[in-house]
Image (cartoon, helix red, strand yellow):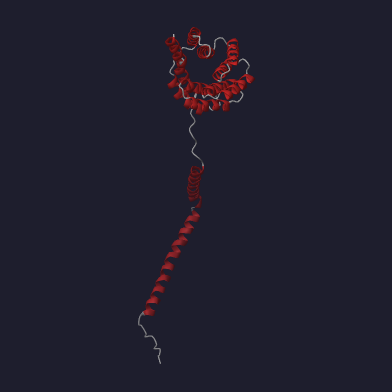
Amino acid sequence: MRLSTPKRYQPGRGQRRHLINSRRWIWLWLITPVIALAGYYIYEQREALGPPVRDFIAERLEDAQSGVATITAPTPLPTTDPTQRIARADGLWSQGAVEAALDEYQVAVEGAPNDVRVHHRYAYGLLIEGRVGDALTAAEDAVTANPFSSDAWAIRAFALARNDRYAEAIASGLQALSLDPTNSSALAYMGLAYFRAGQPAQAEQAINRALDADPENPEVYYVRGLYNFEVNFLLDDYLEDMQQAFELAPNLPHITVELAWAYWNM
């Protein structure tokens, strides 16, 4: 059988506990008057201390609000004015530096998404450079910028013709004419699509209508020159048309190159 033995008495343990409790009471009696005096002083000086405290709290609130605004509000994107880009591009274009002008127009169209003239010039420049796929995309953007622009549908017709999509080019040209029956460029590009599609009679009719609409349009003489060379095999007329186109637009490289080929073939 296991017997439980009482715990031995440990001298001094109760005395230490009593001593700790006594010290707590001493500290309590010492600190309490200090706290009471401090509270009384703050109460008496409330008019002097109030404004600084309120200002401090207000500053912290403003900082917090600024922090929240900084976190939640998106950083505004910088807006670029395309005017200078367009002016530089137009200057380069008039000098015949089409490739350099394209770099400026490419940036300008992003800042002027609804400017049909810039989209038209950009698509036209891409066609001159032989980038027919990119030109068609740019021409589609021109139509998107303003679906009621006859020039946008006309440049789309040119881009489609250069991509060998002749039926679509003719349809786009017809859309341009429905908006402006006197659009000579649309008629010229339709003529290009017609004779490349093997319909020379319709091509000649469209080119003649283009000349009647605007006898000062270099694109009309350019297309008629190609027609005289590829369909009629008339080298003299081909050269004459390219010379006329060059006189009207000496800054356009594709006309200059075609004129050089005309001289070469002669």
Q: How many marks?
A: 0
Residue extending farthest to the right is 178
Vertical arrangement, residue 153 with respect to residue 63, above or below: above
Q: Position of residue 79 (x, y in %)?
A: 49, 30
Q: Nearer the viewer, residue 23 or 16?
A: 16
Residue extending farthest to the bottom is 1
Vertical arrangement, residue 34 with respect to residue 84, above or below: below
Residue, x 57% and y 28% (percent of image)? Answer: 144
Q: Position of residue 11 (x, y in %)?
A: 35, 82
Q: Nearer the viewer, residue 31 or 102?
A: 102
Q: Position of residue 126 (x, y in %)?
A: 48, 23
Vertical arrangement, residue 72 with respect to residue 228, above or below: below
* Quadrant holding the C terminus: top left
* Quadrant holding the N terminus: bottom left
Left or right relative to 209: residue 108: left
Q: Position of residue 140 (x, y in %)?
A: 55, 27
**Looking at the image, can residue 81 be seen?**
no
**Looking at the image, can residue 137 be seen?**
yes
